[in-house]
Amino acid sequence: MQIFHLQVLGEHKGKLHAEEAHHCVKVLRHAVGDAIHTIDGEGRYFPAIIEAIQKDGVLLQLGDANNGWGESPFQLAIGISPLAKKDRFEWFLEKSVELGIDHITPILCKRTGPGRLPRQDRMEKILLAATKQSKRSQLPHLSTPIPFESYVKQTSGKLKMVAWCESHEPLQGYSTAIKDAISIDLLIGPEGDFTENEVTLAIGNGFHPVSLGENRLRSETAGIYLLGALKTYLAY
């Protein structure tokens, strides 16, 4: 099932632009009259028929919208420290979208290393490709990096969890709370983990420290482990 990201122009009208149009017509050889699958990135799926192929894009006749297509009823947000290598953060972006993440915020912690994030346009392409690949209709929101303190003070999830190597509380201890939550905020620290002061600040803002097991995990592995566990508990 090939999915395309479109711009909605009006009632039952849409358009593919740039790379989406090129992939549709030049790579997959779609022609006028072909039926295709489209999403708007805002939570809607549209069955579509190619109406016209133009120099600046592909015009579409849209069927009725399917709201929330491919999305879970839960809101998942994660604050994660930027990683030392760009390709590892790109991998995390891709896999987190497949596991249902809705909001991603790079957080600047005391032990965050000197590594830089990938280019914004590169990250947006990864998010879009992963959204289509995983048959979702809502493009996850990627925030600009903010200080750790600012992030923990602005979160509003019904359940908040911070992964911390020093915690002795297993994730299983929150299984009931996870199943009852409609929105969950997660915190993943840098290599070297959060400082005690950061964890204290997180706890003061409603976060529960959780252990991800005896083995030490890389930041991106910890994030994916936690999202995968939530997917199992919530069965979405």
Image: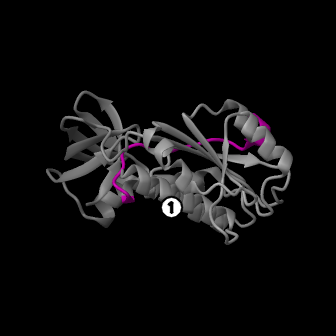
- Residue at 58% over, 54% down: 123
Q: In the image, is 36 to the left or to the right of 132? A: left
Residue at the extreme top: 11
For the N terminus, give its image quadrant: bottom left
Counting from the top left corner in percent of width and height, residue 72 is at 37, 44
Q: Residue 106 appears at what percent x and percent y?
A: 68, 48
* SS state under label 1: helix
Q: Does the magenta run of residues contain 96?
A: no
Vertically, is 29 above or below 235? below
| Picture coordinates of residue 199, whole percent (x, y) | 78, 46
Q: Position of residue 48 (x, y in %)?
A: 21, 44
Q: Residue furthest left?
A: 33
- Residue in view at x 45 percent, y 51 percent: 100
Q: Is residue 140 magenta?
A: yes
Nearest to the observer: residue 106 or residue 122: 106
- Residue named by callout 1: 95
Q: Which residues are drawn in magenta?
A: 133-150
Foreground residue among 83 and 168: 168
Q: What residue appears at the point 36 percent right and 40 percent down from the top-left corner?
A: 40
Rendered position, 229 above or below 69? below
Amino acid under disc 1: Lys
The residue at the far bottom in this view is 215
Relative depth, front residue between 204 and 142:
204
Assess disc 1: are there few (<14), some (14-19) or many (≥20) residues with their C-alpha within 10 Å of its C-alpha: many
Please state if 224 lies on the left or on the right of 105 as rendered.
left
Side of 192 where 35 appears, left or right? left
Residue 147, visible in the rendered structure: no
With 221 as the anchor, is 44 left or right in this view?
left
